[in-house]
Amino acid sequence: MDSSLPTPPTEPRPRRRDRHGRGMRGPVAPPQVPLSASRAETFRDLVQDSVERLERRWPQLSEVDFLVLDVPRTDSPDRPDEWPGDASVPLGAAVPAAKSRPAQIVVYRRPVEIRTKNRDERALLVHEVVVEQVAELLGLAPESVDPLYGQD
C-alpha cells in the first residue's frame, strides 16, 4: 500500500465560490418585494382586496367563503350547455349555502387573466366579477352591492 496517496474526503466540501470565483448567488429579490409573489398569489390578493372593500358595506359577507380556482371545471353545473366550446367561459360562480357548508363565491383566475392586459385592468375585472357574484348570491342588482359598479 502506497502511503503517499491522499485519502479521499468522506464528504464533499461546501462550495464557497462558483467556477468563476464570484461566490454563491443569492435570491433574485428579497421576499418582501412584489417580484417574489407568484401570479396566483397576486391574483388572490386582488380578490381579497375586493372582498374587504365589500365587507365594509355588507358585513354578512364574512360568512361567505371566497375561493380562487385556476379554471372552471368542465362538468360544472353553472352553465354546462354554454361552455367549454363556447366563448362564454365563466369568470366566476356563486354557490348558495348548503346544510354542511357556507355559501361560496369562486373567481376563476386564468379566464380573468386572459381578458386583461395589466394589473390595473385585472383589478377592475376582479372587482366586477366579485360584485356580480355577490349580487347573484344576495339576489340584488350589482349597482346596489357596489354603487361604483360599471364605472371606470
Image (tube, grey):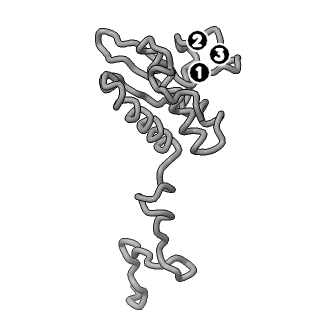
Q: Picture coordinates of residue 52 (x, y %)? A: 38, 35
Question: Which element is circle 2 on?
Answer: loop
Between the C-alphas of marks 3 and 1, the distance is 8 Å
Query: Disc 3 designates what residue?
Result: 83
In-front residue for pair 126/89: 126
In-front residue for pair 27/7: 27
Marking on residue 12: none
Q: Amino acid at mark 1?
A: Pro
In-front residue for pair 130/19: 130
**Which residue is located at x 40 percent, y 78 percent?**
8
Among all residues in the image, which is located at the extreme front? 147
Q: Crowding near pointer 1: few (<14 within 10 Å), some, many (20+)?
A: some
**Which residue is located at x 46 percent, y 26 percent?**
146
Q: Picture coordinates of residue 50 (x, y %)? A: 44, 34
Quadrant, the N terminus: bottom left
Query: Disc 2 designates what residue?
Result: 79
Query: Disc 1 designates what residue?
Result: 90
Q: Picture coordinates of residue 103 (x, y %)? A: 37, 17
Q: Quadrant of residue 49?
A: top left
Q: Say whether residue 118 is left or right of residue 105.
A: right
Question: Which element is circle 3 on?
Answer: loop
Kindly check if marks 3 and 1 are in contact, taking CB atoms under 8 A apart as contact: yes
Q: Say whether residue 85 is left or right of residue 57.
A: right
Kindly check if marks 1 and 2 are in contact, taking CB atoms under 8 A apart as contact: yes
Q: Amino acid at mark 2?
A: Arg
Between the C-alphas of marks 2 and 3, the distance is 7 Å
**Which residue is located at x 65 percent, y 12 percent?**
82
